[in-house]
Image: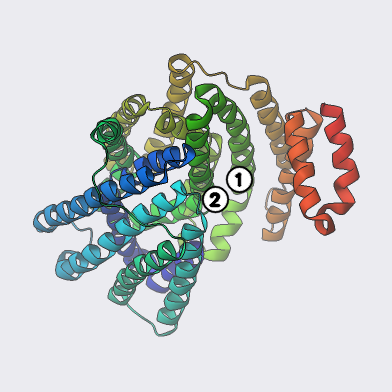
Amino acid sequence: MGLVVSTIIARSLGPEDYGRYSYLIWMSGLLVVFCNHGLGISGIRFVSEYLGRGQQQIARQIHGWLNKWQQISTLLILLVFTIASWWLPMAGWEHHRTLLLSILIIGVASKAAYLFDVSIAKGHKKFSVEALTNTVMSLVYAAGVGLLALGKADLNDYAIFFGAVSFLHICMVWWLMRKNGISPDYTPCPPDLIQHIKPHIAWTVVLVAVATLSNKTIETFLLGTQVGAKEVGYFTIATTLTRGGIDLLSSSLTAMLMPIMAHAYGAGGSEKVNTILSDSIRYFLFFGLIIGGAGLIWSEPGIAILYGSQYQAVTPVLQVMVVVGGLTLPEGAFGALMSTTDNQKLRAGIATLSVLISAIAAFVLVPKFGLTGALVSHASTRVIIFLVTAIWIRKSLNVTFPISHIVRLCLAAMIAGTACWLLMPHHPAVLTQIGIGFVYIFILLGGTIVLKAWKAKDADMALMLAAKKPRLFGPITPWLTRWAGSLN
């Protein structure tokens, strides 16, 4: 639905005004992260762990203690931003500064509270709280934007509606939290528990701050202040489309992985967590190879269909982002491992290095090369940090990566990609490119099976899922049974 909204607004406003709208959305997201600064991550980690130990009352006290500090943090961040906003460059909003500030205060306060609450719900394994809220609010947002587009609304109308929808997020999540029986206990936590939580929060604060600054933030800021609003729009469209595949999948998988790892850590220690990590790396990479390869093929027709010819400059930006995002998707598993096993210091060090690399690359490349410089800065930073993280984790945490299975997955993707490159005509039609994207997926899947990139327990899990939906998977169940037998 975010993709639908982005498409409608971009077509309605045009590149210049859409760039200004994108700057508003980017600034809102940045402030939300600073307001929460990882308190939700700590909530997932400790609420889930103490629920895994059977200590529900302690989990509720942790919820209450973190919620109090989340509210204080939001108030302080918004106060500082309100004062600083009169000196900050606003990328086209200079003559509407008061409107921008009002929308940001309402939207940021609402979204910060919403994200904290859904994090606590994840700690309780109530993933439906976030899923239902996102689904309903996305539909409301898309419907409202559609009506605004039909009414020939201007930039200010879209901005005001964004603030209203942000407020509705927290209204719905409060209702769902009460419905699921999730509530904080504001009685004091045991002092020794607070002393245990504080170092995790401290390193998470550092981690979130530096990770946010390295996640296209510096590039977006420099594009908005030194290049132009139109380039911000192009960069944002590519980011939005990438988020619709790579980032959404990564955050969804990580959201489930963190409480699973925390529960396993509370019940069985590091050995059980390492087993989960090995499996998750394979799954993350497989999904990343699917989205990265198919996204590369579908980028050009996708931009043409969704946004029109005036946005064709987005195509190469999107292609690079989606390929890099797919190849580095297992980074989400690394982050979940470090948060779960009290290695926030290690994670913060990696994130700090990421900011330094991103800042140097962005300040060198963006003013001189504009949009291309921003893309190169983002891509090079992601690849370097992914490799550094993998090496650092393997040495520091003494974990074993499934190297042979990783190689087989990548080899299957290379075979699928080569086949599609040979099939692609010089001037392909839109339907041809879309069809070749599906060919890539099928060849990749078949290649992983032929090259034995899966383990016996993966086949057993596939059989278990097929048994739950016999009408859907009944025809392939005999084949799945033979496949599972060949791996055992």
Horizontally, residue 358 falls left or right of residue 441, namely: left
Q: Residues within 10 Å of mark 2 (few under 14, many from 20)?
A: some
Helix, strand or loop at disc 2? helix
Q: Position of residue 100 (x, y in %)?
A: 21, 66
Q: Position of residue 271 (x, y in %)?
A: 55, 21
Single out the residue that lies furthest toward the bottom: 151
Q: Quadrant of residue 20?
A: bottom left
Helix, strand or loop at disc 1? helix
Amino acid type at mark 2? Gly
Instruction: Name the residue nearer the viewer: 69 or 89.
Output: 69
Give the vertical position of 252 relative to 447 (above or below): below
Residue displayed at 73% across by 37% down: 416
Amino acid type at mark 1? Ile
The residue that mark 1 highlights is 291
Instruction: Name the residue nearer the viewer: 116 or 286.
Output: 116
Count the labels in the image.
Answer: 2
Please indicate, yes or no, whether residue 415 appears anywhere in the rendered image.
no
Residue displayed at 81% across by 57% down: 472
Please indicate, yes or no, whether residue 208 appears anywhere in the rendered image.
yes
What mark, if any, has residue 245 been given in the picture?
2
Residue displayed at 78% across by 55% down: 469
Q: Quadrant of residue 118?
A: bottom left
The C terminus appears in which quarter of the rendering?
A: top right
